Amino acid sequence: MELERIGPYVIERQIGAGGMGNVYLARHTETGRRVAVKVLSPALSREEGFVERFRREIDALKRLKNPHVVELYDSGVDGELYYYAMEYVEGETLNQRLRRQRRMPWQEVVEIAIQVCSALKAAHDAGIIHRDLKPSNLILTADGIVKLTDFGIAQLFATSKLTTTGSIVGTPEYISPEQAEGKRATKRSDLYSLGVLIYTMLTGRPPFLGKTTLDVIQKHRYGRFDRLSALVPDVPRRLEQIVDQLLEKDPEKRFPDAYVLSLRLKEVLKRAEREEKATVTHERDLGYDYDGEAPTVAVGKTKGAQGPGPATVMHNLMKAELDRTQQPTPLGRIFNSGWFLLACFVLLVVGGVWWFRTQPLARVVQEPMEEEPAPGEIDRLLELARHQQRLGDEARAERILSSLCTLLADDPKHERQYKLAQRRLEQLRSRRAERAERDELLKGSLDRAAELVEQGQPQKAAAICRSLLELYRDDTTAA
């Protein structure tokens, strides 16, 4: 039987479901205010323990006043149905975002984590441990606001009943090691779960996965996770250190509280901002204006013949790169970003300064310089591309190789290096095509599993997920 009304609220539609009951979008009959109404399952309403737990959630929300925690408006009993009305937040859950986007930029991840810290600080100050921090309990609005919800299994320090010591309460992928052992959760348990959330947002998967719930729980207690930098090369080192500390097995080694953690996360953003400003300031100190277009350098003429130095190599590489980025392709738009052009500009300026400083010496020695870059420089760039590939930055390796191919094409003097660069470039692109095919298979399989769940066939969906885990459990590039 569908619920049409409860208390003073008219039900519009169901918007969520959980272990304790359903959540509905409703409207107050007198004020017209739209709210989210959570209704305890009728079957659970007859269980005294679950009713007390439901009331505990209401008490928890009443004690929390924070812009990043859903606000409680009203609560009551309608017949045998227990309910409460809370703030309705327009947006999507973090779980929905991750299903759509998989990985998120580290800057956005840090912004979300800082807001979660604010919510956790308010909860911890009120004596509340959330205990079940996970993507489905975080709502993201269109304007970037994060709201923490579902305190249904929160343990209040002041309550002696329904003690969960010796039992495991929480979601396996996000549970802390001490919770996995059945010990009492503390505020540092929530910080561990937040560390798992940050890791998941950055990489697209939790740090620990397994065939069974027990496998996952045991990995939280004893397992080691893949390092962030191995999966996401551009993540700041300081952010990686923060996540490592959050995921410490020993609670005492984690951050002491959410406030201290928020300060560390804010420092990551501030440091990145300072580094960006320092780069721009250094460029301006050199006397050049950077407006997002290709930089130009005015150089006065000098007497006598002047051979090209490393600045010529950088200039030609940058020109080849800029010519290629004019093509309207997604990869070209990445290479045309400001950071890449700025890096090329800095290399050009440094190389140019070095070249002009060495010209007098070149004239004294009277050694003629070739019009093309020396083979040693080309070999250095080939080795640089190989090094970037080993570091996992295949995009940069491809950029270097592609630019070298453009620079050395139809040049018989450098035919060997040209063929080598071309062969490595083809290998890189071939592997990228293979990964694209694999990613398409993964996405199609996960979408099919989601459809099976919606169709009421969870066993078939679970079989698909188990098959994917078996195929790709050791493939970190499939994360």
Image: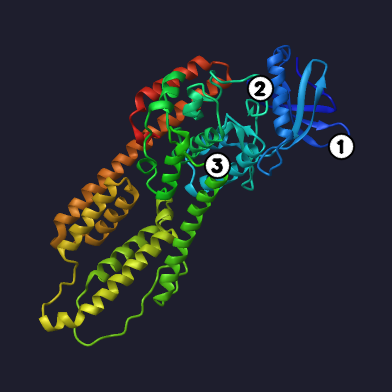
Whichever of callouts 1 and 2 sits on the residue coming sooner in the sequence is 1
User: Is label 3 in a helix, a strand or a loop?
Assistant: loop
**Which residue is found at the position 30% from the left and 51% from the top?**
398
- Name the residue carrying label 1: 31
Residue 477 rendering spot, x and y as whole percentages: 36, 36
Discs 3/1, front = 3
Quadrant where the C terminus lies?
A: top left
Whichever of callouts 3 and 1 sits on the residue coming sooner in the sequence is 1
- Name the residue carrying label 3: 257
Discs 1/2, front = 2
Separation of disc 3 and disc 2 at Cα?
24 Å
Question: Seen in the image, is 452 located left or right of residue 124?
Answer: left
Residue 51 rendering spot, x and y as whole percentages: 72, 18
Separation of disc 1 and disc 2 at Cα?
38 Å
Nearest the eye: 113 or 276: 113
Residue 314 rendering spot, x and y as whole percentages: 28, 66
Asked if marks 1 and 2 touch (Cβ < 8 Å), the reply is no
Report which quarter residue 52 is drawn in: top right
In the rendering, which numbered label is found on residue 160?
2
Asked if residue 92 is positioned above or below residue 45 in the image, the reply reads below
Discs 3/2, front = 2
Separation of disc 3 and disc 1 at Cα?
40 Å
Looking at the rendered structure, the kind of residue marked 1 is Thr
**Which residue is found at the position 18% from the left and 72% from the top?**
371
Looking at the rendered structure, the kind of residue marked 2 is Ser
User: Is label 2 in a helix, a strand or a loop?
Assistant: loop
In the rendering, which numbered label is found on residue 437?
none
Pointer 1: residues within 10 angstroms few (<14), some, or many (20+)?
Answer: few
Asked if residue 121 is positioned above or below residue 323 in the image, the reply reads above
